[in-house]
Image (spheres, helix red, strand yellow):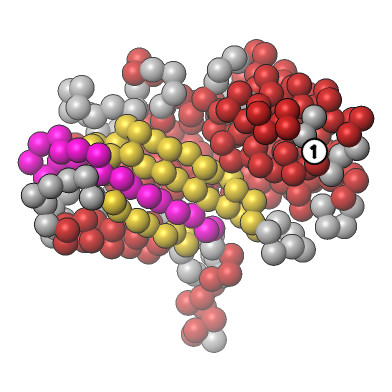
């Protein structure tokens, strides 16, 4: 009974963390090994929600932190690749929910540093040190929120709001720390969570749920109805895109879903593909060649 109780209280994330520091000279490799372990412990051992997860229910994710350059003593500029997925019912397939690269990460880290994060004091006592945990906490909440939303309409809303709380209280240090403010561009952490929670994009949240729960999760039992649900929703995406051209949220979505749209279209009669291909190609420019190849 004791072991069962411990398992049901397991943390939510099952994250693989990698840190690449090959570009940095004159820094002991042990620093980056320590950073990798600290980040893995931070993501996997922290309790991010109030819910109980069994080990097989954990959300699978990958974080690849590539150190690009030094920004000062023990301070680094980096890019962060974030991937997450969730299982599809009655299959051995995991559907990607996040496949995104954040190229705006700067932080301070020393080998013995303990990673601390407090939702009520995101900025901490040292901005550069706190920025590391703020960025990773932001994406942890984003992953959890999107995962919950894929199983229940707006089921992850509270966790997306926690990600927004990180944005609203993010560390500041002049122009050195970026990615958190509306004035710093249109494709950063601020705008991504703002659009996820904005009423302007409410139909996106509805489609996110129907794509996963009413589409993919029904594919093994009712494939025709499941495909129709997913394909009918492309009109909704087109409407969102027309009202909000070049939004980061749409780019974020297609980064994860292009391959699935292509696979679904290849199972659709050729005569029915043309309109879907045209709509997807206009919205998902990086994936347009793949759509046209199956037209």
Task: Assess whether residue 253 is covered by the magenta stretch.
Answer: no
Q: Main secondary structure of the magenta part?
A: strand
Residue 139 screen position, x and y as percent: 43, 43
Residue 198 picture location, percent across and down:
56, 24
Q: Position of residue 102 (x, y in %)?
A: 39, 36
Locate residue 134, reporting x and y percent: 32, 42
- Up the image or down, 265 lies above or below 54; here it is above
Q: Quadrant of the C terminus?
A: top right
Q: Observer-nearest residue: 85 or 264?
A: 264
The quarter of the displayed image where residue 268 is located: top right
Q: Quadrant of residue 23?
A: top left
Which residue is rendered at x = 70% and y = 43% of the image? 260
Specify the segment rendered in magenta: 59-76
Badge 1 crowding class, 10 Å Cα cut-off, few under 14, some 14 to 19, many 20 or more, is: many
Q: Residue at x 54, y 81 (%)?
A: 4
Q: Is residue 154 visible?
A: no
Residue behind mark 1: 265
Residue drawn at point x = 65 percent, y = 37 percent:
258
Q: Residue at x 76, y 49 (%)?
A: 216
Residue closer to the observer: 246 or 38: 246
Q: How many marks?
A: 1
- Name the quadrant of the N terminus: bottom right
Q: Closer to the camera, 20 or 212?
A: 20
> Does residue 29 appear in the picture of this structure?
yes
Left or right? Give the position of 193 relative to 250.
Answer: left
Q: Nearer the viewer, residue 3 or 45?
A: 45
């Amino acid at each position: 009974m004791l072991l069962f109780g411990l398992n049901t209280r397991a943390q939510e994330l099952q994250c693989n963390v990698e840190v690449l520091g090959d570009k940095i000279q004159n820094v002991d490799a042990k620093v980056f090994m320590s950073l990798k372990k600290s980040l893995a412990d931070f993501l996997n051992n922290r309790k991010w929600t109030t819910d109980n997860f069994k080990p097989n229910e954990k959300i699978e994710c990958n974080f690849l932190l590539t150190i690009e350059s030094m920004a000062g003593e023990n301070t680094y500029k980096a890019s962060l690749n974030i991937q997450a997925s969730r299982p599809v019912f009655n299959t051995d397939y995991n559907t990607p929910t996040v496949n995104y690269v954040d190229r705006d990460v700067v932080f301070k880290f020393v080998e013995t540093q303990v990673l601390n994060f407090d939702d009520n004091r995101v900025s901490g006592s040292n901005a550069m040190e706190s920025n590391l945990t703020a960025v990773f906490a932001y994406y942890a909440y984003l992953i959890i929120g999107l995962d919950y939303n894929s199983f229940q309409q707006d089921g992850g809303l509270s966790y997306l709001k926690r990600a927004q709380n990180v944005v609203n209280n993010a560390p500041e240090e002049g122009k050195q720390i970026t990615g958190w403010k509306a004035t710093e561009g249109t494709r950063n952490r601020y705008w991504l969570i703002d659009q996820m929670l904005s009423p302007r994009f409410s139909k996106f949240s509805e489609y996110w749920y129907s794509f996963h729960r009413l589409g993919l999760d029904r594919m093994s039992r009712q494939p025709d109805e499941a495909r129709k649900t997913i394909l009918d929703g492309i009109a909704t995406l087109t409407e969102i895109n027309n009202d909000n051209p070049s939004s980061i949220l749409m780019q974020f979505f297609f980064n994860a879903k292009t391959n699935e749209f292509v696979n679904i279209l290849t199972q659709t009669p050729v005569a029915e593909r043309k309109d879907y291909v045209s709509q997807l190609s206009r919205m998902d420019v990086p994936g347009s060649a793949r759509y046209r190849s199956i037209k």
